Image (cartoon, rainbow, N blue to C red):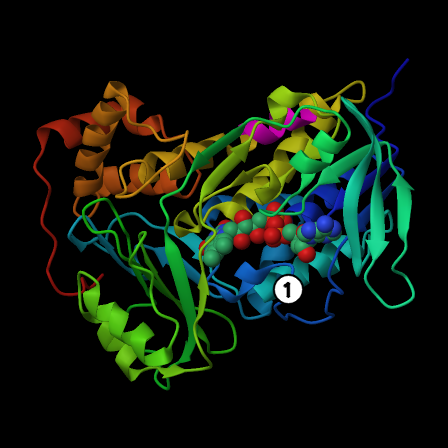
Amino acid sequence: MDSGPSLGHVAVLGGGIAGLLTANVLARYATEVTVVERDQCPDAPEPRAGVPQSRHTHVLLASGIQALHQLLPGFVAELTDAGAPTLSVPADVGVWQSGQWVSRRNPSAPVMTPSRPLLDHLVRKRVLAEPRVRMVPSTEATGLLGGPHQITGVTIRGRAAGRRGEQELAADLVVDATGRGSRTPQWLARLGAAEPADELLDAGRAYATGVFHVDDRTSAGDIGGFYIVPDAGQPLGAIILPAEDDRWMVTLSGPRGQAPPTDPAGFVDYARNLPHDAPHKWLSTARPLGRPVGYRHTANRRRRYDRARAGLLVVGDAVCALNPVYGQGMSVAAQNAVFLDRVLAGAARTPSAHELQQAILRSSQWAWEVATGADSPMPGAVGNALRNGPLDRLADWYLGRVRDRVPGDPVVCKAFRDVLFLLAPPRSLLTSPEVVLRSLLRAPTPTPPDLPTP
Ligand SMILES: Cc1cc2nc3c(=O)[nH]c(=O)nc-3n(C[C@H](O)[C@H](O)[C@H](O)COP(=O)(O)OP(=O)(O)OC[C@H]3O[C@@H](n4cnc5c(N)ncnc54)[C@H](O)[C@@H]3O)c2cc1C
């Protein structure tokens, strides 16, 4: 008789946030977990080549904070002790949405804003302290072993001099956590297996991020940062948030054809186009610490491994990559691991890779709906996941009414924010009678044109 899940040897490809959190959970049910990571991971909070987005602002949403607390008890306190700011949104942040500031008196929920290298460093330290997790750094996964429906291992190649030959690593379960650039579809094709169906929605959003210093922390008034929310009518976005070590992360973003520049003067100048001058004023008094960096791979892409029965598990951005402007990816990676643990902890036998993959799909479903729902009406959005049927247009019309009431209506604001922070399903905006009545029957409440005081 089976006495619970027993995964044997698990090979996790990619030691980013999704790979490490997955390794941490699977280690509870495995004899050993080997994490194969292409980079030589630094022993300090530093950006690395394999996670190029780590130079951009990374917000950890309320749902991600909760998930990390659950996965790694005490971790949130460690993050705070290392200097990661916690902000209440909207109480601490100037949030501009639907043509006005969101009232800071509306109910708030926390976000954390450590730099991505700090978060990754602390997650790595915690997970690698687990005796059953072993990291193989400077080693690249190059292909899969096995056949259609059953993957039995992976081919790997060292990147350091003298270790460049290809080797085989056998595993009872292979997990792809190699991020947005995952090559698993091609590797499966090489084995004669079907590639997963691809769902794509690309709004063409381009990012640029600069790091800044301000001498006076209160130079933005009593505001702890800014978030200018883009929408179909006003497609420019801005995020100005503090990170550890007195640094401020500033991300500007624009739709297809309106990429923010990466030269320091042009970057600051671009902020003049935002719908309110407060972020530009703030930037003009801040000191840049280096040159801004750009980023363009922001499409929403979901690969339907849950239908493919590929005989391996795919997590994180490798299965569901989201437009970063909604700040969801790390929280979803943490939710992936929480859902895996839930399935494994409740199982009397070892679940199949397919059952685990379905849990991954469920754990990212709200985020996928939020990102594709918000991106569908964006100018220039393309892809087979575009939602533009008659019912979608009706939903857009209704959600437009919800969005317009967020700034001045505390009830609608809380419901909307809970969906955005992945604390509640998107359908809750349609099923809450209070939200529906306020959105359909009440006019939007205007908020003050200058930065609202709490
Ligand atoms: C500009 C930008 C801003 C973002 N802002 C936010 C935000 O505010 N909040 C948020 O939650 N999310 C944000 N995200 C999303 C977030 O960065 C990702 O969702 C998250 O990093 C996904 O984690 P992952 O582990 O799946 O992939 P990654 O973090 O990309 O890690 C993949 C890992 O796999 C390794 N790897 C790759 N190929 C191989 C191979 N062949 N063999 C071995 N190892 C390999 C890489 O070196 C890397 O370590 C943003 C993304 C971008 C692009």
Q: Looking at the rendering, which quadrant does residue 206 occupy? A: bottom left
Check the picture and name the quadrant holding the N terminus: top right
Return the residue found at the far bottom: 215
Q: Nearer the viewer, residue 403 or 441?
A: 403
At 45% from the left edge and 78% from the top edge, which residue is drawn?
A: 291
- Left or right position of 14 against 83: right
Q: Is residue 359 magenta?
A: yes
Q: Main secondary structure of the magenta part?
A: helix
Q: Is residue 52 magenta?
A: no
Q: Is residue 26 above or below residue 159?
A: above
Q: Nearer the viewer, residue 307 or 112?
A: 307
Return the residue found at the far top: 1
Any atom of ligand 1 within 8 Å of the CB at mark 1? yes
Residue 242's x, y, as percent? Answer: 42, 69
At 51% from the left edge and 72% from the top edge, which residue is drawn?
A: 244
Q: Secondary structure at mark 1?
A: loop
- Assess disc 1: are there few (<14), some (14-19) or many (≥20) residues with their C-alpha within 10 Å of its C-alpha: few
Q: Is residue 71 above or below residue 247?
A: above
At 72% from the left edge and 69% from the top edge, which residue is drawn?
A: 42
Q: Is residue 363 above or below residue 331?
A: above
Look at mark 1 in the image and give the residue it sits on.
Answer: 49
Residue 268's x, y, as percent? Answer: 30, 75
Residue 209 visible here: yes
Q: Nearer the viewer, residue 433 or 235?
A: 235
Q: Which residues are magenta?
A: 356-362
Residue 406's x, y, as percent? Answer: 22, 43
Residue 389's x, y, as percent? Answer: 28, 21
